[in-house]
Amino acid sequence: MTDRVNGSTFAGEFLTGNMDFFTLLTIVPVAQTNVTTPVVDLPSYQTYASTGVWTTVTVTDSTGTATSYATLNAYLDAFYKQLNLDNLIRTFAGRANPVAISVNSISGNIPGTSTPINAGNASTSASTLWAYYQLYNNIATPTALFGSLYETGKTFYSVHVATEKSLLWTTGNVSNYSTTLASDNTNAQGYNILASNSLYQGLDGLTAYDLQSSQVLSGSSNSSSAATNSPWVAKNTVAPYVNTWSTSSATLTNTLAAQGFVLNTVGV
């Protein structure tokens, strides 16, 4: 018999050999929950609308695990985690085709140690850990720090993205660029994924949704114009807690990024 050495493909199935890889570490809640149905479109919505009694909703997530949501807030937490991830993927897709995505989370101590993760303090071992893996923000002189308002007790989400082609997105400190500036933002070296959303279609300033049950992002509001005018008010029966992806603020940065798949060795 003949040994199969190259696997199976079909006509028209191919992928470039010049892929690029990214890791984003963020406090913005993201997950592959598969919860995408607005509340008003649930089969049980009419019961909820007429009686105020929530019917448990069960959804199978990306791992094949069936998760039951026994309250409105629990369901909306999962809904907005998926929506944040979808918006992140759309941002990548604006310049480069994402072909593989995975999401993990970490909280408490640095894996393998008894040291708590403190996000934004330069003196902590966490900042040393982020720097070791080349995870940087996009302030004027990039550092391996979250905003100073994020110190303790946070859950971090690591998102790994493989894109089909290189030199479309980039990230990190000046070592990734041909110029002396970390944000050259040209197609010579690729636009920074952490750059301004309004100027370069990066993540900085892109709308993010906080957890409905207990907010984790500094400054989230369900009474701002962005929240009260959100289409999700009508779709989900309550105003969402709205914030932004932040990458360039010394106080509010909630996302770091690196080129390459990193953090896998410490469990995330």
Image (cartoon, helix red, strand yellow):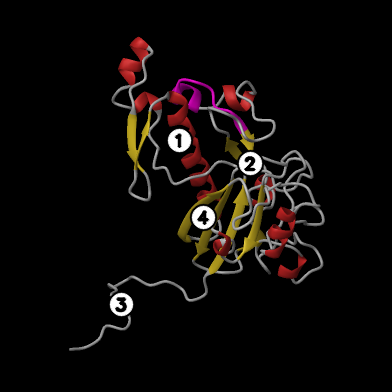
Q: Earlier in the sequence, mark 1 or mark 3?
A: 3
Residue 137 visible somewhere in the drawing: no
Residue at image position (49%, 33%) is 77
Q: Earlier in the sequence, mark 3 or mark 4?
A: 3
Residue 146, position as x, y percentages in the image: 72, 47
Q: Nearer the viewer, mark 3 or mark 4?
A: 3
Q: Are marks 3 and 4 in contact (CB under 8 Å)?
A: no
Left/right placement of residue 246 relative to residue 76 reads: right
Residue type at numbered disc 4:
Ala
Q: Quadrant of residue 149?
A: top right
Alpha carbon of mark 2 to alpha carbon of mark 1: how far? Answer: 20 Å
Q: Are marks 3 and 2 in contact (CB under 8 Å)?
A: no
Mark 4 surroundings: few (<14), some (14-19) or many (≥20) residues within 10 A: few
- The residue carrying mark 2 is 154
Against 222, is 80 above or below? below
- The residue carrying mark 1 is 79
Q: Which quadrant of the figure contains the N terminus?
A: bottom left
Residue type at numbered disc 2:
Lys
* Magenta residues (range): 232-242
Residue 194, position as x, y percentages in the image: 67, 53
Q: Quadrant of residue 72?
A: top left
Q: Secondary structure at mark 1?
A: helix
- The residue carrying mark 3 is 7
Residue type at numbered disc 3:
Gly
Residue type at numbered disc 1:
Phe
- The residue carrying mark 4 is 93
